[in-house]
């Protein structure tokens, strides 16, 4: 499995690197840390622009300036995780990988159906892969029609072990947390509410912070997880909800839903109006709705804060559902199944651990004595492992 973490350190890529780490912890994986060569800056800028107009469809098969790598052994599967389709060409740095890998999978996280025609000269890069997986439901048919074979659709996920507040739930000292894109109407209402009620409201103050570079993606995810699982409310909205020119009106579930959910925060905002959300978030109060213009934000949030028992029940249910359904290990199991591989004992062990944490979340939802429940959990786990 190649990784781009040595040179592509954008904040938005951190979740993909987290997914890679979960697989590494659950399977026998050789991670190839691709590194830039001297001409990488040219390949990343000039050559990338040329690909969009390359009628020969050959440029997309060139190494964009990474240090060449040769595989020294054979593998069952070659896995490439790409936030965007354009990242696929980084695999060109691995010379002759098709000759050493029985099968191959390319997982593209974000691809909007209406962008497929614009990326026509990038599509030949997918021809080398046996299976193509997309992270946005509804894009599979458009890409499948364009490349002449079916594509699979698998939702994003989260490292629920990292984000879960269990087994030792911290105090929720952050009242409201908002990360990434937001509706300005809601934001103004929350600023006013925080000022009047002396609430702690965390929000981005940088323009397009997701494009910034991290000093280390793992540290960034740890910080983010620690803030989120200390938050009572977590703001959510459909992926790129205010960029219709890019999405073409397609509705998708952003990673924020999985992250806030896993942290046991109460999701507040808008539920994506798509079939995938109704199927994968099918429990009551998965999202507490607020109008995008913020007209009812103060009323809805004030009412939530006035009902601590309701907040606790939603929090526990959210954390439990994430542990049972939305960890990266469940996505990897499905991908390996598609590639013809069986889950490993380490995957099954992780699932068992997730189930134990989920049971703890359910127990706390019924009996709010968190320290006592956590103590019983630790005793049970210790006895099972003795």
Image: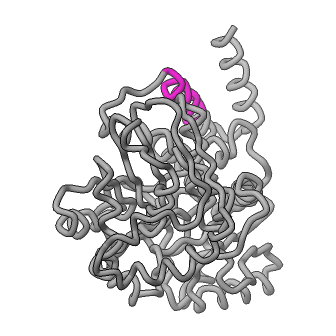
Whether 356 is among the magenta residues is: yes
Query: Which residue shows up at 50% across the image and 75% down it?
Result: 237
Q: How many marks?
A: 0
Residue 263 appears in the rendering: yes
Q: What percent of the width, then of the height, locates residue 216?
A: 76, 57
Q: Which residues are magenta?
A: 345-359
Taking 320 as reference, is 229 left or right? right
Query: Which residue is located at x 49 percent, y 39 percent?
Result: 329
**Res. 302 in view:** no
156 in the magenta segment = no
The image shows residue 286, relative to residue 212, as above or below, that is above
Say which of 244 and 117 sits in front. Answer: 117
Of the pair 208 and 74, the residue shown nearer to us: 74
Percent from the top left, x then y, of residue 352?
53, 26
Q: Nearer the viewer, residue 108 or 299?
A: 108
Where is residue 85? Give x, y as percent. 41, 67
Where's the C terminus, which quadrant? top right
Point 69% across, 57% down: residue: 6
Residue under the point 55% across and 30% down: 350
- Residue 188 in which image quadrant: bottom right
Q: Main secondary structure of the magenta part?
A: helix
On screen, residue 317 versus residue 179, left or right, reads left
């Amino acid at each position: 499995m190649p990784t781009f973490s040595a040179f592509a350190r954008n904040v938005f890529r951190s979740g993909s690197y987290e997914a890679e780490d979960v697989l590494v912890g659950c399977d026998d994986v050789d991670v190839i840390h691709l590194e830039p060569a001297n001409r990488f800056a040219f390949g990343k800028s000039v050559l990338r622009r040329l690909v969009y107009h390359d009628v020969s469809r050959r440029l997309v098969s060139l190494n964009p300036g990474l240090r060449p790598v040769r595989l020294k052994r054979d593998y069952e599967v070659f896995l490439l995780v790409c936030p965007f389709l354009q990242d696929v060409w980084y695999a060109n740095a691995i010379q002759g990988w098709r000759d050493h890998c029985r099968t191959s999978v390319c997982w593209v996280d974000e691809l909007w159906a209406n962008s497929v025609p614009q990326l026509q000269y990038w599509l030949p890069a997918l021809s080398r892969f046996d299976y193509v997986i997309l992270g946005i439901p509804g894009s599979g048919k458009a890409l499948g029609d364009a490349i002449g074979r079916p594509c699979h659709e698998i939702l994003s996920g989260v490292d629920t072990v990292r984000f879960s507040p269990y087994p030792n739930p911290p105090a929720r000292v952050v009242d409201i947390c908002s990360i990434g894109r937001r509706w300005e109407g809601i934001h103004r209402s929350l600023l006013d509410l925080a000022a009047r009620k002396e609430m702690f409201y965390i929000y981005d103050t940088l323009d397009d912070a997701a494009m910034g570079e991290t000093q280390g993606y793992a540290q960034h995810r740890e910080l983010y997880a620690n803030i989120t699982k200390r938050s009572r409310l977590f703001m959510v909205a459909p992926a790129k909800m205010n960029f219709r020119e890019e999405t073409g009106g397609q509705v998708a579930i952003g990673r924020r839903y999985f992250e806030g959910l896993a942290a046991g925060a109460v999701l507040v905002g808008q539920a994506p109006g798509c079939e995938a959300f109704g199927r994968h978030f099918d429990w009551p109060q998965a999202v507490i709705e607020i109008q995008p213009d913020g007209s009812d934000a103060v009323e809805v949030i004030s009412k939530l804060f006035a009902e601590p028992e309701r907040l606790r029940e939603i929090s526990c249910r959210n954390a439990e559902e994430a542990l049972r359904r939305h960890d990266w290990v469940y996505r990897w199991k499905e991908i390996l199944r598609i590639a013809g591989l069986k889950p490993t004992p380490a995957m099954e062990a992780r699932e068992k651990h997730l189930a134990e944490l989920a049971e703890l979340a359910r127990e706390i939802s019924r009996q709010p004595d968190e320290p006592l429940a956590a103590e019983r959990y630790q005793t049970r786990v210790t006895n099972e492992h003795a």
